[in-house]
Amino acid sequence: MANCMVFNAQIASIMEVLANAAVAEICKLVDDDYAVFRLEITQSQKENRALRRKLQLLELKVARERVCASRLSSVKIPDRYRGMARGEGHLTGGHRSFVKLAGHNTWRDDQPITVDEGSGTSTQHIIMIEAAGPGVKQERTEGEDPRHSTDIQTGAAAGVVPPVATEELSTASTLQSRTRCSIKEASRTPNAILKSETVTETQRLLQTGSDHRSDPERLELGPLGCPALGSEYLLDGNPSPNTVHSHRDSGDVLETGNDPSCSYTTEMDPGNMPLGLETQTDLSRGDWNRYSSSVYSEGCLDKKGEVIVVDKVKVEGDAPPTWNVDETHLGEGHSQGRDFLDYRESLETNTNITTHSPLHAIRDREPVSTSMGPSDSHDRVLFHQVFNSNDRARAQTHGGGTTSGNSKEKRFLCMFCSKGFSCPQKVEIHQRVHTGVKPFSCTQCHMCFAQACNLKRHQRVHTGVKPFSCTQCHMRFSHSSSLKRHQTVHTGEKSYSCPQCEKRFSHQHQLKMHLKVHMGERQFVCTQEVLREVPPQDTPAEKTFHSMT
DNA sequence: CTGGGGAGGGGGCCC
DNA sequence: GGGGCCCCCTCCCCA
């Protein structure tokens, strides 16, 4: 009996121990789960805070817009900042952007913010500016929160919504505080960021689809919430700048509606240009004429009562109407030049433009009278591009920079890729790379050309004329460069050298073929390395090549 | 190697 | 003299 009781006591103690162990185990699990759960709660709370900040910013932004709408005023932006801040044209309209200062940010880079503006939503991208970088200059203005003073000087009112989402955002005065931000190589990849900005802006244009003229931001507010780096290019409030939109009444300009897939992003992207344009215009119907007119010669036709008979404009693609020219039709340049002049004129007729460009002299001319109707996203974006290029040109002019460092100033920039050229004709010719317009067609074959001289050269194929003859042999060439290249046969010149070995070649193609040998050998040896575990140091291309040869 | 197109730059001419 | 326009040259590339 006593034993039984002892046994029971032992069992009880054991069970107690087991129970305690089980409880401890359970408690441990609960604690772990609780910790995880608490962590999740903490994260959620952080997210909620961030979202609240965004919401607050957006609300304040709307308030700021309303405030700014009532005090629209022309703000002169230092030209030298335009090109930069406009980000090669892609920051324009970037009032949708916020500048997020490094160190103050609570958002992720490039974090989109969806804004409900009543007429639609838009995605905004936060531009991260490395405020502490050596290339960043802090500039302060009166009443300015130093934290808001990034490197982009816009000198405009209606400042940036401090991206830091600080509490002082709650006051309108803060919102209107002048913010000077100037981007100087602030971003490591400005183009990418700026392009994304353009994308979102153009998308917004499309999505809202409303009359943006009444949008004060378009008038005054520039990128980064700063006033209007590119605001002048907008026609808002300016009755005269008929300019680039003379064809907008065509009705079929763009039926993008709210479809972001028809975004001008594609259009803006040189690489995708043809596709993007096809989404906007029916090339097969010759709408390219309209496009190209709107780009190059906006308004000039209406104004002057002229009709540039774009008899045939051949565009890469199907059913290309062709602007037939023969070698005597090289007067195309006249119309080209006039068109471009008018195109520039149309830009300059915008009285909101503050410019010191020499082109500005044209401004005094009779304003172009066109049938520009209510705002149109397509036209607006086109004008956006056009003016940006022009403005960037001015920025380059005043900034002293040239696109490729040539001695001659390249004030005329391609609206698609911002490449600079010394004269408008060259820009127009260059832009055919993007537009695919080839106005010069051969009368004897289907070939079309973007440059008259190329057509002229091509026609030697038909005529058999070979004006370039070798002085050392009987060879004749239709290409001057072909002759030059041929003469390396006689001179023995081998200007193409292999970077991986000592071999030299007289023709580039030979070098390319040779390099393929290198590549092939390298791959071969890599394979051998895998199979034989060849030490890596034994496999430089040169050694490999030499050993194999 | 040659043929030939794409594209940019230079220079002359004209206004 | 300066700027715009136009043609030619040249380089690059591909077939």
Image (cartoon, coloured by chain):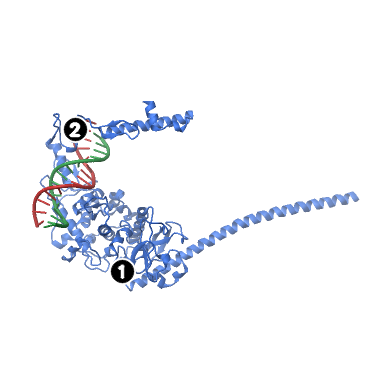
Chain colours: A blue, B red, C green
Foreground pick, A414 / A262: A414
Q: Residue A214 carries which label?
A: 1
Real-space CA distance between mark 1 and mark 2, rounded to the nearest whole angstrom: 65 Å
Determine whether the residue tagged by mark 1 lies in a helix, strand or loop: helix
User: As shown in the figure, which amino acid type bears the numbered disc 1?
Assistant: Ser
Image position of A476 (left or right of A508) = left
Q: Is residue A258 visible?
A: no
Determine whether the residue tagged by mark 2 lies in a helix, strand or loop: helix
Q: Where is residue A536 in the image (x, y as percent from the top left)?
A: 46, 33
Q: Earlier in the sequence, mark 1 or mark 2?
A: 1
Q: Where is residue A396 in the image (x, y as percent from the top left)?
A: 27, 57
Q: In which quarter of the image is residue A178?
A: bottom left
Q: Number of marks in the image?
A: 2
Report crowding for label 2: few under 14, some 14 to 19, many 20 or more residues within 10 A (C-alpha): some
Q: Where is residue A328 in the image (x, y as percent from the top left)?
A: 10, 46
Q: Is residue A340 visible?
A: yes
Q: Which mark is residue A487?
A: 2
Q: Which mark is residue A166?
A: none
Residue A95 vertical placement versus A427 (above, below): below
* Chain letter for mark 1: A
Q: Position of residue A364 (x, y in %)?
A: 17, 66
